[in-house]
């Protein structure tokens, strides 16, 4: 019999020598679990801090927000996606092109975690319903939550008119508003994180933001590249809203007052925790920017022929130009010139609107902004506008943020060098866990292969051995729900057994162990980790070996199969606690022979056997005799004096009563006690098949406890 723990150690050593590629690392289950845990810890930590600031966040709300988080990380270099969240599900592309300059894995790791930190910031601090309500009103041509003060000016009044009356102009304004709001929101949540959480999270954000700033150009450089002044201005505002800095070098004097006025407005709202005040600030910025935006529209209209359009910028029907079109091209040009003299652009065409919307999106992209998914529904946990938060802190700690930021000339002033040692330590741990997982998976494959060879040799006929290579989240959830109801039985048996055998202990104590029942303070100074001791038991071998076969024939379903799963859970839990060898498997027919489904294996190395038990299901026939012969042969090999084999079945064995009783007698000669637990309506048939080895289980709900009691009696022999 192979020593699987020794084999595991060999494979772990080999796997540890192989460095993981970026794709292997970032798509590993271990990396996802690490990121998931970091996200959950971050939510817990910030919620605790907000409570201390007076925000009414119940533990139930916190737990709900934590449970809703589902992390998904993939690695695709040809995918433009960076990261996103809908308020619960968080997706990160660790292979996106933005991260290509990061050659060191630990730097890429920091950047990926920076995405995680940023998206969790949205989960906690962003109030998506507020943003959606604001955008919905803008789409209708209405200001919300209040009309901006800026519409009292001449240019503001012109903006208000175009917002309400011109559909295509409104689409451009909407895109500009989205870009400013998204950048302002990104900056707000990152300021909150740096203030409330700080530490490594701030370093991870800095690593990511450094990449965003790396290729940023100054105001003058963008103008030299032919970028329209309005979109250069927009780019600088998005930069400031998110990073508290601009690159104003080369900015013409005529644009400086507008830039400074926008910056002042951003400073007014960037620390506001009330989401309505932040979107109201964006409305004010639209009013400030309007003259430059309209100048851009006029320049475009002068350089492009006016397309067919209807009244108020709406397209005319095919073959006509609407009311304006009836005046002819000459009248249209005259109207355009008249409007230009008044300082306002003519109604915008769909083509002009599309071009400006695309430019606005590009400006947002260069400043590191991304569009928020429309299906986000979570609300801010730090919204002082809610009644229950009336006494909470309305703004982030402005004194820590310092005075209003001045216009900067160079990027990256506040971004420090990353301490890579922390990232390297995390990656080393993740890579070791990944190596361990791969080694365990390899052992599982080898174990299944050995079991198949063993079964074929024992039965010399048609037999197939199946074993789940891994377990799903559904298996784990099902086990956790079922185990809570039944494992108290196994724990009670363990406690009573420990009390009974206490008298058998001798006085010898083994010390200097890496683990044990008692910490020896006198050994701590060695600093080798071997500071534990335990009592020595006189028994060198286990008291009992247990085998459990669960009938998985087609008639086993519903309550019957659930009773089998519960029994398996109790027996596995008891044997694991008592360090007893244990085999648990299901049996059914396959291709005229036996199909054995392995759930619990003595010597298994991946610690997932208990979850495999929930995979029991009704399948095909009932080759009970072959299953008993196979399990008996396996138990016989174990160096244990007492061996117990329990079979739960509803009868109708394919072998017949006489053949089955003969197999049971042969098992007894081999030192294996067989007990057949009859369940269901055909218990009388099971009694005929098992004779003196029959146990009547009339109440399936009590089967787990009854069979655990049998193990207890054999354990105390």
Image (tube, rainbow, N blue to C red):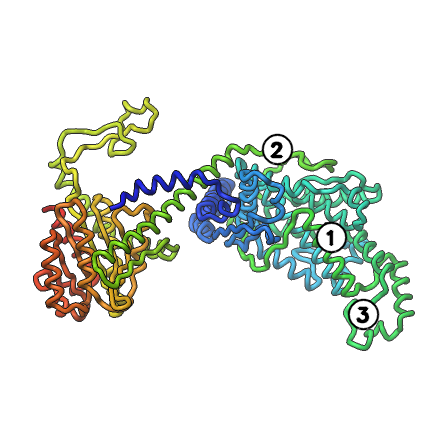
**Relative image position of residue 517 (x, y in whole percent):** 24, 34
Q: Nearer the viewer, residue 321 or 620?
A: 620
Q: Look at the image and tell me whether residue 383 can be seen.
A: no
Q: Position of residue 440 (x, y in %)?
A: 36, 46
Q: CA distance from mark 2 to mark 3?
A: 53 Å
Q: Which comes sooner in the sequence, label 1 or label 3?
A: 1
In the picture of the structure, the residue carrying the numbered disc 3 is 309
Residue at 60% x, 40% y is 102
Q: Residue at x 73, y 47 (%)?
A: 235
Q: What is the number of the mark on residue 416?
A: 2
Report the side of 215 relative to 70 (left or right).
right
- For the residues labelled 1 and 3, the Cα–Cα distance comes to 26 Å
Q: Does residue 455 lie above or below 559 as drawn?
A: above
* Mark 3, secondary structure of its residue: loop
In this orientation, does residue 498 appear? yes
Left or right placement of residue 502 versus residue 338 in this view: left
Residue tagged by mark 1?
286
N-terminal of the pair, mark 2 or mark 1, is 1
């Amino acid at each position: 019999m192979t020593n699987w723990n020794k084999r595991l150690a060999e494979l772990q050593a080999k796997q540890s020598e192989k460095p993981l590629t970026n794709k292997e690392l970032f798509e590993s289950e271990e990396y996802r679990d690490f990121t998931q845990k970091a996200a959950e810890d971050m939510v817990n930590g910030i919620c605790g801090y907000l409570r201390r600031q007076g925000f009414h966040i119940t533990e139930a709300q916190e737990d709900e927000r934590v449970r809703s988080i589902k992390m998904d990380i993939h690695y695709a270099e040809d995918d433009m996606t960076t990261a996103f969240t809908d308020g619960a599900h968080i997706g990160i592309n660790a292979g996106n092109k933005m991260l290509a300059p990061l050659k060191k894995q630990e730097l890429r790791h920091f950047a990926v975690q920076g995405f995680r930190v940023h998206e969790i910031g949205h989960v906690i601090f962003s109030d998506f319903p507020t943003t959606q309500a604001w955008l919905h009103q803008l789409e209708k041509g209405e200001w919300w939550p209040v009309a901006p003060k800026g519409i009292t000016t001449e240019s503001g009044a012109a903006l208000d008119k175009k917002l309400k009356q011109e559909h295509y102009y409104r689409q451009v304004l909407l895109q500009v508003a989205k870009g400013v709001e998204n950048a302002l929101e990104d900056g707000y949540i990152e300021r909150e994180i740096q203030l409330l959480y700080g530490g490594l999270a701030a370093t991870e954000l800095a690593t990511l933001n450094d990449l965003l700033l790396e290729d940023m150009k100054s105001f003058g450089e963008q103008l030299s590249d032919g970028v329209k002044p309005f979109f250069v201005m927009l780019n600088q505002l998005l930069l400031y809203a998110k990073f508290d800095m601009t690159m104003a070098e080369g900015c013409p004097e005529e644009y400086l007052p507008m830039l400074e006025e926008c910056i002042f407005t951003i400073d007014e709202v960037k620390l506001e925790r009330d989401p309505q005040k932040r979107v109201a600030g964006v409305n004010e910025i639209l009013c400030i920017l309007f003259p430059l935006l309209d100048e851009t529209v006029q320049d475009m209209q002068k350089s492009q022929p006016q397309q067919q359009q209807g009244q108020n910028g709406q397209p005319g029907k095919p073959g006509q130009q609407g009311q304006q079109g009836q005046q002819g091209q000459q009248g249209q040009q005259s109207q355009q010139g008249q409007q230009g003299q008044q300082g306002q652009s003519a109604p915008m065409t769909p083509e002009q609107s599309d071009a400006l919307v695309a430019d606005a999106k590009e400006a947002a992209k260069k400043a590191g902004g991304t569009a928020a998914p429309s299906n986000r529904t979570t609300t801010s946990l730090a919204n002082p506008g809610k009644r229950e938060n009336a006494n909470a802190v309305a703004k982030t700690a402005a004194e820590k943020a310092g005075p209003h930021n001045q216009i900067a000339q160079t990027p990256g002033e506040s971004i420090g060098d990353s301490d890579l040692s922390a990232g390297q330590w995390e990656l080393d741990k993740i890579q070791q866990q990944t190596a361990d997982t791969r080694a365990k998976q390899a052992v599982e494959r080898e174990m299944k292969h050995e079991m198949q060879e063993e079964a074929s040799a024992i039965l010399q006929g048609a037999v197939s051995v199946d074993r789940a290579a891994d377990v799903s989240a559904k298996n784990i959830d099902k086990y956790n729900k079922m185990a809570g109801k039944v494992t108290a039985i196994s724990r009670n048996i363990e406690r009573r057994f420990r009390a009974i055998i206490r008298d058998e202990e001798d006085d010898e104590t083994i010390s200097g162990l890496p683990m044990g029942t008692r910490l020896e303070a006198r050994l701590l100074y060695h600093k080798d980790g071997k500071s534990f001791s335990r009592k020595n038991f006189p028994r060198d071998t286990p008291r009992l070996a247990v085998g459990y076969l669960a009938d998985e024939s087609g008639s086993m379903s519903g309550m019957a199969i659930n009773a089998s799963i519960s029994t398996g859970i109790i027996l596995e839990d008891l044997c694991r606690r008592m360090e007893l060898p244990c085999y648990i498997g299901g049996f059914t027919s396959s291709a005229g022979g036996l199909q054995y489904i392995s759930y619990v294996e003595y010597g298994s190395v991946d610690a997932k056997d208990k979850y495999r038990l929930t995979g029991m299901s009704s399948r095909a026939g009932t080759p009970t005799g072959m299953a008993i012969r196979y399990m008996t042969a396996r138990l016989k090999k174990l160096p244990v004096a007492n061996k117990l084999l329990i079979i739960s079945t509803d009868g109708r064995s394919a072998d017949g009563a006489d053949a089955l009783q003969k197999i049971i007698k042969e098992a007894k000669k081999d030192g294996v006690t067989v007990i057949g637990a009859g369940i269901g309506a055909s218990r009388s048939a099971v009694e005929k098949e098992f004779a003196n080895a029959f146990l009547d289980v009339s109440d399936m709900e009590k089967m787990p406890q009854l069979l655990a009691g049998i193990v207890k009696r054999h354990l105390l022999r």
